[in-house]
Image (tube, rainbow, N blue to C red):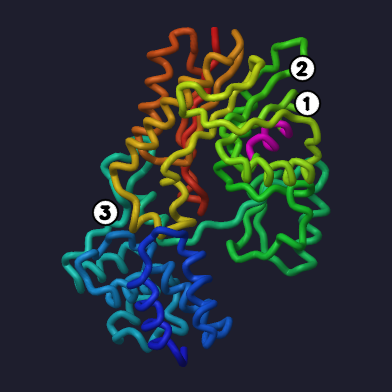
Amino acid sequence: MKYANQYLQSAHTILDAYDGSTPLAIFLKKYFSLHKKHGSRDRKNITHLCYAYCRLGHAGKNLLLEQRIRIALFLVNETAEGWAELFEQSWLEQWDKPLNIKLAFVKLQFPLFVMEDLFPSIKNISEGVDAQQFLLSHLVQPDLFVRIRSGQWKNVTQKLSEASIPFNAISNTTLSLPNSAKIDELLLLDKEAVIQDLSSQRIAEILSEVKVFTTNKFRFWDCCAASGGKTILTKDILGEMDITVSDIRTSILYNLATRFQKAGINKYESLTTDLSKPNCVLPSSMFDLILCDAPCSGSGTWGRTPEQLLFFTEKDIKVFADLQKNIVTNVLPLLVTGGYFLYITCSVFKQENEDIAAMIASKNTDLALISMQHINGYAQKADTMFAVLFQKK
């Protein structure tokens, strides 16, 4: 690559200035708007260097920034194409070797490089997560996944084929695509297909355990609704229901309304409330199913936002765990007898997962555990999640 060294220096400048206070994508956008000399190819290559560097987390933290960028490029890229001028011949000779051999080579060059330092608080991850596989998954860009809605398979796959966008069928409802695939203007999102990580889609397997037991309209509350993706999924799995959604952010619920309209969900109750507060505003009705996709560290999704590997601190785990305990305590009284409570995080930390499940069980003896699982997406270039389903006796 003609300008590889210049790209390396630009990435060095950006990473030196980046403090993690905003998402890296936003920081890069602002940087490039101030430095208009960079064309589209320049921006693409500099961005790649920055994200590759972030994927190392704190591995090799005692090395020079420029050395770490080179190590990251070596580990993240399958070929040296375009970057060869940045490396000595000995590195180029190892480039096409399996990842474990490449890691051993890096360790030989830099004995202080410790792969386990990549992920913050690795000692706190759940036993149900394979630590080594999970660590290595951060060196790979996750895929983009779409869930095709009922009756839209032929339509969606035909559109993708005609646009020459490669895809793989994971199931009869799920496609994986390259993360860079531009489908926003190609597909009618939320009507034809929903952009939703593979692990999030697997929540459908847990929802299939929910038995609609009431003769009245089934009442569902997505208490931490965010963009509403799991509400759309729940409706697609369980059918017609009275829907209530809530979130702490009015702006999020506004965006959710637009999304619901596209998805054909026109009747629902919406509530802005902070469920972590003792005297929070609650819905006036009881519910047959409460879904709590709790605010969390997001540690199972950092393959998509690898800058988090650099700036997350262990004390934040307790902050999220306390928040989750408060939310669960406030919402559970609104569950009817026979009703279901589904608690979900996209975290790998035990304090946010099994410990919260244990707290729920110990403080609510009228709840029976139906299922509890880690949804490990790291072998399929997807997120890692946790889900536990209870039923009220």
Could you say whether the residue bearing mark 3 is in a helix, strand or loop?
A: helix
64 vs 178, left or right, is left
Give yes or no for residue 119 being in the magenta stretch. Answer: no
Name which residue type carries label 2.
Lys
List the residue tagged with mark 2. 217
Q: Which residues are magenta?
A: 229-236
Mark 3, Cα crowd under 10 Å, few <14 / some 14-19 / many 20+, is some
List the residue tagged with mark 3. 116
- The location of residue 375, given as percent across then percent down, is 49, 38
- The location of residue 24, given as percent across then percent down, is 46, 64
Q: 29 and 164: which one is in front?
A: 29
| Mark 2 / mark 1, whichever is N-terminal | 2
- The location of residue 372, given as percent across then percent down, is 47, 26
Quadrant in which residue 99 is drawn:
bottom left
Q: In the image as oriented, which residue stretches furthest toward the bottom?
A: 2
- The location of residue 11, given as percent across then percent down, is 40, 77
Residue at x 66% of width, y 52% of height: 175
Residue at x 73% of width, y 34% of height: 236
312 vs 39, left or right, is left
Quadrant in which residue 150 is drawn:
top right
Please determine whether, in this image, residue 117 is positioned above or below residue 83.
above
List the residue tagged with mark 1. 240
- Between tags 1 and 3, which lies in front? 1
Please determine whether, in this image, residue 93 is positioned above or below residue 148.
below
Could you say whether the residue bearing mark 1 is in a helix, strand or loop?
A: loop
Instruction: Say which quadrant the C terminus sits in.
Output: top right
